[in-house]
Amino acid sequence: MGIAGKLNLLIQQGSDNPSPSDLQFRHTVIASSAVSGGTSIPVYELPVAIPNGTVLKFGSVSVTSSGTNNAGATTLTVSSFTGTIAADTQASGPPIDLTGYGFASKMRASYDDPTALITVGVSATNIVDGRVRLIVPNATSAIVAPNIKWYELPPEIKTDPAALQDDTLFSRKALSAAYVWDFEWTTPGGLIERKLEGYSWVTPEATK
């Protein structure tokens, strides 16, 4: 099941998609103990088979899977590598096949608010490759009170969208309270899992 990943959203009224909007979900491979170089990595049970030739990056160390690595294996066989991989270091594995999954996502003014401000649409763009897209149509975001103006955004975000994920940039300014959101899916077996959660900011539109 794991812990939900953190992802902050920026919703610009007048636009039909938040930033970021395209997501890909992958299986996680985790080193179970430290290893320095060699041709094998001790791992917690592999969630799926890792195809031969798959490149995985454990921290700063990239490795290439070699031979047969079946689901449930506790050793990942790889081509010879150098460098040290610390225990519990994670790597992204193959994409998760989302066939048969259900998706749900909502944004609220606070976690205890009984009414959702926005129901975020989720569109499957490539189910087998684990890809979905978040959609917030303008007609939906237009009815929500903006909680930040463009010129109030930390300048780093205007030049580097990835900076949206740095909460410390927002804490430097006295801004309106952030909205909260999360993303959940239901597996074909009926298991509900929260996969993403974070803050969301809504900027007003000038072109109306």
Image (tube, helix red, strand yellow):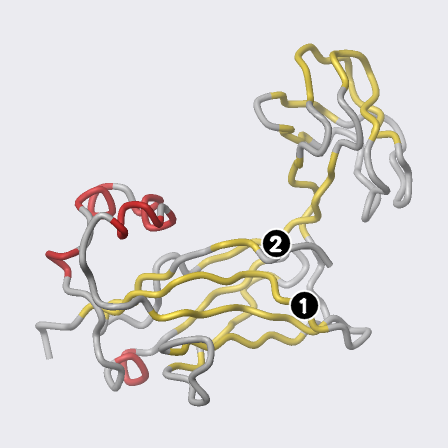
Q: Is residue 160 above or below residue 16?
A: above
Residue 100 % position (x, y)? 73, 73
- Tell me the kind of residue under disc 1: Glu
For residue 55, which quarter of the picture?
Answer: top right
The residue sitting at 25% across, 86% down in the picture is 143
Q: Residue at x 72, y 24 (%)?
A: 64
Measuring 39% from the left and 81% from the top, which residue is drawn there?
118
- Residue 60 coordinates in the image, percent (x, y): 57, 22
Image quadrant in which the N terminus is located: bottom right
Residue with the most extreme bottom position: 115
* 204 left or right of 19 in image: left
Q: Which of the pair 165/50 is nearer the observer?
A: 165
Instruction: Identify residue for label 2.
Output: 25
Q: CA distance from mark 2 to mark 1?
A: 13 Å
Q: Position of residue 20 (x, y in %)?
A: 39, 57
- Dot 1 falls on a residue whose secondary structure is strand
Circle 1 Cα neighbour tier, 10 Å, few/some/many (<14 / 14–19 / ≥20)? some
Horizontally, residue 3 falls left or right of residue 78, namely left
Residue 34 horizontal/vertical position (percent): 75, 22
Residue with the mark numbered 1 = 193
Give the foreground label among 2 and 1: 1
Q: Earlier in the sequence, mark 2 or mark 1?
A: 2
As drawn, the label of residue 40 is none
